[in-house]
Image (spheres, grey):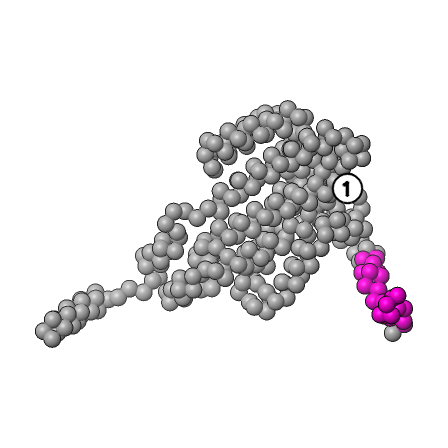
Amino acid sequence: MTVLAETTEEGVPRIPIGDWIESGFDWVSDNLSAFFDIVDTVISTAVDGLTDLLLLPPAMVLVVLFSLFALMVRGWRFGLVSLVGLTLVVSMEQWDNAMQTLSLVGFSALVAVAIAIPIGIAAARSDRVSSVVRPILDLMQTMPAFVWLVPVVTLFSIGVVAGVVATIIFALPPGVRLTELGIRQVDKEVVEAGHAFGSSPRQILRGIQLPLALPTIMAGVNQVIMLALSMAVIAGLVGAEGLGGAVTTSIARLDIGLGFEAGLSVVILAIYLDRLTAAFGKRPPGGRGGRLRRRFQRSPGAPTADKGEVVEEQAGGRKAEGMAGAR
């Protein structure tokens, strides 16, 4: 091929992968522009609406509501820490930026989780799907975060939509991996018990595998949110507003104070979201395996022995014990 006619300084034929990828994105941009316009409208409307909703009540009212929610989820200590931390964000005049970042992170994480969990379930139930998905996830997870900003800006131009799409791509892999891991680690005996009781694969997934895999799945959700928050700050370089925009402005102006205030607000927001999602993934004391087994035993569809069979079995047991004693 003439494409490979050029060689490098070492005499190796040059493969113009970058040129091919650029041509592919140009073709997509030229032929699917209407689709990307619709996606742009949907994302911008959703993120702007969520931001307006978060900025509608006074800042301290929302701080108290977030703190009360933290109190109900994890206890009074986390509620108090949340109250102090979020009040500090208000005092640094970073509340509006924090809510813009929270809306971007919330929407991106919601979309990423909605995509990741079904793919993780499919990968857990099929080795073929897992073998196809794994290298794609490796590419998405190991590619430098700044690289994802280039193609999304090509497709969506500068703005919050480009930041949201780049955040979804960057944050999605942990959700898929940990969902697959959690389902694959479910005790096979419990799954076999479900099959023995006549449960369908969908009932086993909903009643056994997902509840038992919930701690691992929630760990994946936690990682999705943390990566989305880190990427949302980087997305400030492509015009995304919020704390990422404040960090970018501080770099352009060499404003150390603004940079530390925005960075500290990111830390407070990250700690709040991390502890909150971690609380939902905690396994209740005693585990769920025993309760699931007892639930199947009590379920109407579970096979039960006839009373006569039970009596006969007990009598046979006593007879066997008597024979053993006589020996």
Tell me where the magenta segment starts and ends, as one range: 2-26
- Up-down relation of residue 201 to residue 218 (above or below): below
Q: Single out the residue that lies furthest toward the bottom.
A: 327
Q: Which sits in the foreground, 131 or 26? A: 131
For label 1, the crowd category at 10 Å Cα-Cα, with few meaning under 14, some 14 to 19 and many 20 or more, is some
In the rendered image, which quarter contains the C terminus?
A: bottom left
Q: Which residue in the protein does label 1 denote?
A: 237
Residue 284 in the image: state x and y as whole percent. 41, 47
Left or right: 69 with respect to 284?
A: right
> What residue is at 55 percent from the left and 67 percent from the top?
126
> What residue is at 56 percent from the left and 51 percent from the top?
220
Left or right: 296 with respect to 234?
A: left
Q: Single out the residue that lies furthest toward the front.
A: 10
Residue 120 in the image: state x and y as whole percent. 57, 59
Magenta span has 221?
no
Left or right: 240 with respect to 300?
A: right
In the rendered image, which quarter contains the N terminus?
A: bottom right
> What residue is at 79 percent from the left and 48 percent from the top?
153
Could you say which quadrant of the image residue 133 lies in? bottom right
Magenta span has 6?
yes
Residue 91 in the image: state x and y as whole percent. 64, 24
Q: Is residue 297 visible?
A: yes
Left or right: 13 with respect to 166?
A: right
Q: Which sits in the foreground, 141 or 107? A: 141
Q: Mark 1 is on which residue type?
A: Leu
Q: SS class of the residue under badge 1? A: helix
Q: Which sits in the foreground, 273 or 112? A: 273
> What residue is at 69 percent from the left and 42 percent from the top?
232
- Up-down relation of residue 45 to residue 129 (above or below): above
Q: Single out the residue that lies furthest toward the left.
A: 326
Could you say which quadrant of the image residue 11 lies in? bottom right
- Up-down relation of residue 294 to residue 97 (above or below): below
